[in-house]
Amino acid sequence: MFKKVFPLSAILSLRFLGLFLVLPVISIYALELENSTPMLVGIVVGGYALTQAIFQVPFGAMSDKIGRKPTLLVGLLIFLAGSIICAYSTDIYTLMIGRFLQGAGAIGSVITAMISDLVEEEIRGKAMAIMGASIAISFALAMGLGPVLGAKYGISFLFILTAIFALFAIILLFTKVPTPPKIKHTYHESAKTSDILKDSNLLNMIIINAMQKGLMTIAFVLIPIILTSADFTWQKSDLYMAYLPAMIFGLVAMGPAAVFGEKYNKPKEIFLLSIALFIGSFLIMGLTSSSTIFIIGVVLFFIAFNMMEPLVQSMITKFAKVHQKGAALGIANSAAYFSTFIGGTTAGLLLGFSNRETIGISVAIVAVFWLLWTLRLQNPIKHSHLYISQNDVDMSKLKNIESNHIAEWYINDTEKLVIIKYVSDAIEKEDLKAKISR
């Protein structure tokens, strides 16, 4: 599995590493550009997410028609072009165009679909967790490197690095990524958006994903601007002193959170703890007058973000039925990208007419409501999978088999297999075979 997933995760990680590198510093650099305003800066910070949200579905559909690899190539080339435009922009509007182009290469859903093509159902959750963890590691590394490299070489250098990462990703695509098999899953009903949104656990995961990404953008608009403002009077070159410890603590927290959430099946507890840390972090950053205490708030924010990141995609795939996975991930990712854009734009607007204390308290209050909503989430039921030849199955029995102990069944047409997802603690494999055999 790892050999199949790692190259795709590396491609996605390189793309996110480029996007994340500029996040810790882009707001203060963008403020210095011609025609800049706080609101436009907020749009620049989150602008890539708007076009990501818009193009997620078209790229997914294109990958179904022309293939995964050609679609990934198109997305990476668009991302490369946007990075180059950003690197050489001298006014806020050109930078905005470049950021919109970076997001337009929306390959996230294509990579998720490709992983689904390559990886078996019962270990797909682990594959998604690997992908989530790789993104979290990129995030943590970028927080340490971005401020240091930006202060020494300027933000244009960071965008050039991003373009180089895109080139490396293209090389990986054609040298390390296997060509996915043509597998058609046939299920006895079609996916409906209404069914996904009516599922309380899936809806909770969509909200968790969206809120996490929205708060991320708010934080990256506020943190560098606040630290370099009259409140703390830091220099740009000093920002690493806030981001470096945050990166270290975030990485340390990510491993135990992933193990506790996946191995011990306690993601709800991880999500609730993370939200509580988000609340504390924004209250601290909004109310403290000490730069040391402010850094503690930044550290808490990074711990919360990194604890969540490896689990989000995995939990969505666990809660969704097989015919819903693509749609559920698409909805969740689109909601997250829209939230990222809204978070950046809102933070920019608030900076124009509000103070730090009001912003911190307001975000914390919203997060409290999020915490209360998330109490409704349930930890996923542990399932096993039965693989049985389609020729050995009585289809009339199969069609009536769903119960409290059998979550779903579907057919792999290519390999002529029936796959049944069931609760192994409630029903024995041999008993299950007997129920559907000819």
Image (cartoon, grey):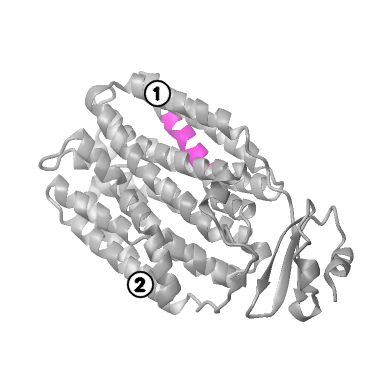
Q: Which residue is mark 2?
A: 73
| Number of residues whose C-alpha sits closer than 10 Å to that of mark 1, classed few (under 14), some (14–19) or many (20 or more) | some
Q: Nearer the viewer, residue 290 or 22?
A: 22
Residue 144 horizontal/vertical position (percent):
39, 46
Q: Which residue is mark 1?
A: 362
Residue 82 horizontal/vertical position (percent):
24, 59
Quadrant in which residue 394 is drawn? bottom right
Q: Is residue 297 magenta?
A: yes
Residue located at (59% from left, 48% from top): 255
Spatial CA distance of label 1 from label 2 is 42 Å
- Secondary structure of residue under mark 1: helix
Residue type, numbered disc 2: Leu
Residue located at (74% from left, 56% from top): 383
Q: Nearer the viewer, residue 376 or 217?
A: 376
Residue type, numbered disc 1: Ser
The reply, left or right, for residue 137 in relation to residue 100 is right
Question: Which mark is drawn over residue 115?
Answer: none
Image position of 356 with respect to 374: above or below: above
What residue range appears in magenta? 295-307
The reply, left or right, for residue 326 in relation to residue 103 is right
| Number of residues whose C-alpha sits closer than 10 Å to that of mark 2, classed few (under 14), some (14–19) or many (20 or more) | some
Disc with the residue nearer the chain's start (1 vs 2): 2
